[in-house]
Structures are given as structure tokens and as C-alpha cells.
Image (tube, grey):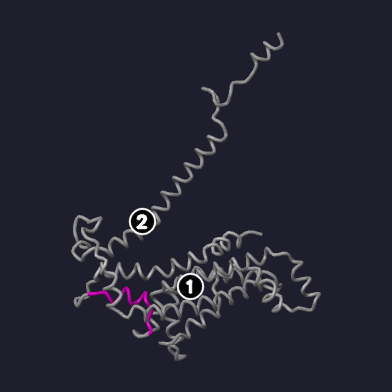
Amino acid sequence: MRGTAATGRSRRPSGSPGGSPPAAVRLRTGRLVLYTVLVVVTGLFLGPFGWLVLTGLKTSAETAAAPVHWLPADFQWHNFADAFHLIDFLGYARNSLIIAFLYATLVTLSSAWVGYGFARLDAPGKKTLFGVLLGSMMLPQMITLLPTYLIFARLGMVDTYWPWVLWGLAAAPYLVFLFRQFFAGLPRELEEAAIVDGCGYATIFWRIFLPQSWPVLSASFVIAFTWTWGDYIAPQLLLSTDRSTLAVAVMSTYVTSAGTPVTHLQAAASVMYVVPILLIFLVAQRGFVAGMSTSGLK
């Protein structure tokens, strides 16, 4: 009787009809949904770049056709060679590389130093000053455009790389915020032990804190390099044609005698213009992702 009662009270197998699905099935279903969403989102982000590549492979008539020609009838691979040889592509790319690398290196180090000060040093009004620093990110670039040009013109720095050197030494508010958040999460015992050994704050920064912050250094360098590589306004305003950057050349050179943009050549040049940024991100993506994910955590 007990065996019969126990059998009657036994639970139905989880995989039987009417029962809840096994945990493994739910896990596979959840992963399938997640991967589907990620693929859709990735397609949305890659869509504009794919359209740019297709536009660079079309003829001039196909780019201006109505209705839109989604795919070129014949892939015009020579558009990339034409766009490369029509201007001094390597010369403009060299100018962009010099400016971007110079600014990214300097602003990363200066922002790390300022972020270290906000995170580990005590001073009256530090929180207020940090709030003002973050508030400066709300200022549009157009507001400071004319004063910036007048200052550099009076200093005789127009058509030189000195503006980017000074901007790099001045630190960037967003990067300061990243470093400040990261340094604030490091143990206090690190610097206390160094102070006992006779180290000053500069030595602590260079020999202890900076080597610990390689993820944020990588993220900061990639962000600053991308900012400068893609900047159009400052090089257009401060540099002559010979010293100008690739961004300015791509946007202003591929035009007809009437001033109409040659769309397919602009698209082909834009694809080649984006390639260095993609390569830098692929090389530094591990540190970039780690830096962005840890700089806000304590």
C-alpha cells in the first residue's frame, strides 16, 4: 500500500507533456533569443558602412538614380584606385596620423595625471572643481570656435601642429572622468606603502598607478585618436591645404568644377579613410572594452 501510494504521488517527469521544460531547453532558448537580438543590432550598426562600400562600387549615374539602385550592376573596383590617386592620399593620411597620434598620446597622459589628482589627493573645493570640469563637456564646440581661432592666431600657431599639442596637455574632461573613476577604486594601501618607502605623489603615479591602468590607457588612446582622426572643423579652420588632414581632403576635394560632390569617389575614399580606425580598434579592443567596463566600478 505504501509503495502504491508513493507511486501515485510521484511527480510527472519534467520533459513529459504538460510539465515545465527542462532547464537546458530554457537555456538554449534564451541563448537563441539573445544571439538573434545581437545579430539584428549588429546588422543595424553595420548597415551604414555596408551601404558606404556599395556606393563606392557604383557608377556616378547609379548613385544619382531614382529609384535607388541597391546593388551596382557592375562592381567598379577602380573607384578606390581613382580616389586614392586623385589626391595626395598618403600625404593627407600622414598629416592626420601625426596629429591624431600626438594628441592622443599627450591627452591620455595629461588626463591620467589630472584624474589621479581628483581621485587620490585632498584639496579644498575638489568636488566643486570636478563638477565644473564635467559641466564643461556640455559646451558645444561651435561656442568656443571663434575664441579658439583668435587665441591661436595671436600666438602665431595657425598652420602648425601646436594647437593639438596644447589641447593634449590641457587634458579632456571625459577622459579625466574615466581615469578618476578607475584610480578611485584602487586600494589605499598601495600608496600608503609607497609613502612609507619615501615615494612622492609623482613617483606613486608613474610607478604604481599608471602601470595598473593599462585598460583605461588603451580606451583613452582609442577614444582620443578617433576624435582627432574624425575631426573636420579644427583642421579646416587652423591648417592650410598642404598641412590639412584626410577628413578635410575627403569632404572637400572630390567635387566637380561646378562644386557638385562626386559621390561614388567620396564613398570610396571614405571607406579607405575608416580602415585605420578599424585596425586600431581591432588591435586595442581587449583593452578598450576592459577600460570602459572597469572605469565606472569600484
Give the side of residue 90 with respect to residue 128, left or right.
left
Q: Quadrant of residue 169?
A: bottom right
Q: Quadrant of residue 239?
A: bottom left
**Residue 220 shows in this picture:** yes
Magenta span = 243-255
- Circle 2 residues within 10 Å: few <14, some 14–19, many ≥20: few
Q: Of label 1 and label 2, which has the lower sequence position? A: 2
For label 2, the residue is 47
Q: Please, what is the three-letter code of the amino acid marked with disc 2?
A: Gly
- Of helix, strand and loop, which one carries label 1? helix
Residue drawn at x 20%, y 66% is 60
Quadrant containing the N terminus in the rendered view:
top right
- Of helix, strand and loop, which one carries label 2? helix
Which is more toward the observer, 80 or 105?
80
Quadrant containing the C terminus in the rendered view:
bottom right
Q: Please, what is the three-letter code of the amino acid marked with disc 1?
A: Phe
For label 1, the residue is 225
